[in-house]
Image (spheres, rainbow, N blue to C red):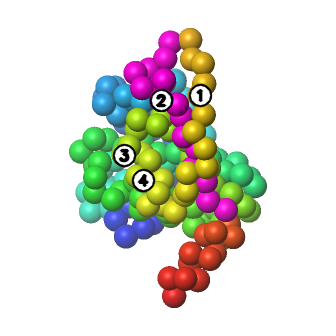
Amino acid sequence: METERLTLRPMTGSDADALRALHADPEVMRYLDPAPVENYLGESFHAALEKTTGRFIGWFELKGTPDAELGYRLHREFWGLGYATEGGRALIDRGFTAGGVQRVVATTMFVNAGSRRVMEKCGLRHVRTFHVDFPDPLPGTELGEVEYALTKQEWESAISGES
C-alpha cells in the first residue's frame, strides 16, 4: 500500500532489527509497555517506509473486524511531519473500503497529547476516559487512558462532506 509519502508493507522477520532500534528509544516508548519484537511481526502490522529514502520510519497496525484497533509507532525524527496521520488514514480507509471494518478504535494514555492529536486528525473522536490498575504504572497513569473511535458511517459522512 502506498500513500503520498509512505510505503506500507507487511512486517517480516527482516524488520526485527529496525523494530528493536525503534523500541530502544525511551521517548518512543514513554507511554508504552515494552513487548517482544516478535509480537509486531503479525499480518496486521505494517512497516512504514519513507518513499523518497526507503528508510524505516516505524510501523502501523489495523487489527480486527468488524471492530479494528489502530496503532502506530514512529521514530522521533519523524514526529510532527504528518506521517502518523497519513499512515493511519490510509489503513482506516482500506479497512472501511476493503477490510470489512465497521468501527476503528484507538487508545492511549490521557497524557499522550501527540497520539491523541493523531487520532483526531485521522477522524476519530473521544469516546471515553477510563482507568486501569497496572502493577507498575507509568507516570501519568493516574490521569487515565482514553479511547477514540470512528464508525464506518461517520467515515462515509465525512468523505461525502469533503466532495
| Residues tagged 3 and 1 counted as in contact (Cβ below 8 A) | no
Mark toward the start of the polypeptide (2 vs 4): 4
Residue at 45% from the left image edge and 66% from the top image edge: 2
Residue at 54% from the left image edge and 58% from the top image edge: 124
Q: Quadrant of residue 28?
A: top left
Q: Nearer the viewer, residue 8 or 133?
A: 133
**Could you give the CA–CA distance between mark 3 and mark 1, rounded to whole angstroms?**
20 Å
Mark toward the start of the polypeptide (1 vs 4): 4
User: Could you tell me which secondary element the residue under label 4 belongs to?
Assistant: helix
Labelled disc at residue 114: 3
Residue under numbered circle 4: 118
Q: Which residues are magenta?
A: 136-151
| Residues tagged 3 and 4 counted as in contact (Cβ below 8 A) | yes
Q: Nearer the viewer, residue 74 or 111?
A: 111
Residue under numbered circle 1: 131
Residue under numbered circle 2: 143
Name the amino acid type tagged 4: Val
Q: Is residue 115 left or right of residue 146?
A: left
